[in-house]
Image (spheres, rainbow, N blue to C red):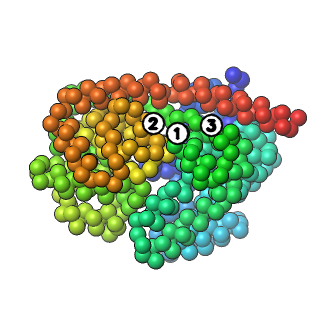
Amino acid sequence: MQKLNIAILSYRSARFGGGQGVYVRDISYVLNLMGHNIDVISGPPYPDLHEEVNLIKLPGLDLFETFSFRDRLKKLLIKKNKKIDDYYEFFSVLLGGFPEPKTFGTRANKFLDGIKKYDLIIDNQSISYGMLEIQKRFPFIEIIHHPITIDYKHELESSKKIKFRISRYRWYSFLKMQKKVAPKINRIVTPSNSSKHGIINEFKCDKKNITVINNGLDTTEFSPIKNFPRNKFRLITTSSADVPIKGLDYSLKALKILKKDFPKIHLVVIGKIKKDGHTQRVIKELKLEDHVIFKSNLSKLQIKELYASSSIAIVSSLYEGFGYPVIEAMSCEIPLIATNISSIPELTSDYAKLIEPKDEQMISNGVKEILLDYPKYQEIARNGRQHIIQNFNWLKITEEYEKIILSTIEKFKNANF
């Protein structure tokens, strides 16, 4: 395959903030290893990239760095050469919206106007109006991890309070744009069959435009640590606190049940707790203040060490387009309990204990069962790591990306011949 110049667009790529930053770092690196020149064009917060990959910063106002009105106003006032997008971004956030996908798309389209050097553009889920313009000028692939309409529905189900529902309506107002844009995208890549079905149903996209390519994992970074002491009573999960779709409430309720038989049991949550938020209130109501530990801003080595020190990993999500915590835990060779929903059974195969969502009793029973026969589940975990190595390695996934890149470029050339 010839050497290509590829730009990866990402409206935000937080280093520690969920799967998007991880995806941008990994996909840019493997495309670079394939021999291509890679530029990541990102809005703030910016990604942590491998040194071989070039970062082009496309600054927005980064208004979610703070929740102080004064600080946000200062960000607007000190911005030089302000454009309409800057004012739109400020007032949209002021009214409770999330404008970053839209404003980034506009900025990216303007940035690329007149630039001819790129052979391919990949957008990481902004699904914005600007991408339709970029698609006219370049071979283009849109990455959709999963339709965010599903997050919106789960949030609405979590509360019937009018004020909360209005705030969610404002926050997810960008979905109107994504529902209009997605069906007009010619080439979509998504990481699971579950996400593909969601994109077809939620965004009304033509299935022939969607290709499933799993995300990969560096199984040397996420690996077991020999002779590392495990704490029998330590459970571990990954969750963005106060995001209902992650199902953390049910892991906490299970912990409450388990505490009766295992007084030393505790849960490490990889994620940041929101002060005075829903999760903090639930922990207090369940009297689990001394049994839950939150860890955030961790390196991959620190995450690996936490898995190595824990006895069981739990993924109690209500939906996962592609569950990085699932394959990370399995790659670290730790017994796993996970919900039997969306993409999760695609990832785990037979190497995890699958349970029904929203069922704290099943989580509790699963933990007890594993603890009472731990050697059996350790063997399952060892086989689970081999399953991840065989099916989610970047060599296999790179070959699939090569095919889609070549076909996208060829189709674009033929359409413009």
Quadrant holding the N terminus: top right
- Density class for disc 2 (Cα within 10 Å; few <14, some 14-19, many ≥20) is some
Tag shown at residue 346: 2
The residue positioned 19% from the left and 56% from the top of the image is 256
Q: Are marks 2 and 1 in contact (CB under 8 Å)?
A: yes
What residue appears at the point 49 percent right and 46 percent down from the top-left corner? 321
Residue 141, image x, y percentages = 67, 41
Amino acid type for the residue under numbered disc 2: Glu
Ranked by sequence position, the earlier of labels 2 and 1 is 1
Q: What residue sits right under mark 3 in the picture?
A: 211
The image shows residue 104, relative to residue 352, as above or below, that is below
Specify the amino acid type for callout 1.
Ser
Q: Secondary structure at mark 2?
A: helix
Residue ranking furthest to the bottom: 162
In the picture of the structure, the residue carrying the numbered disc 1 is: 192
Q: Secondary structure at mark 1?
A: loop
The amino acid on which the numbered mark 3 sits, given as a three-letter code, is: Thr
Query: Residue at the location (27% across, 64% down)?
Result: 282
Closest to the observer: 100 or 153? 153
Position of residue 159 in the picture relative to residue 11 (left or right): left
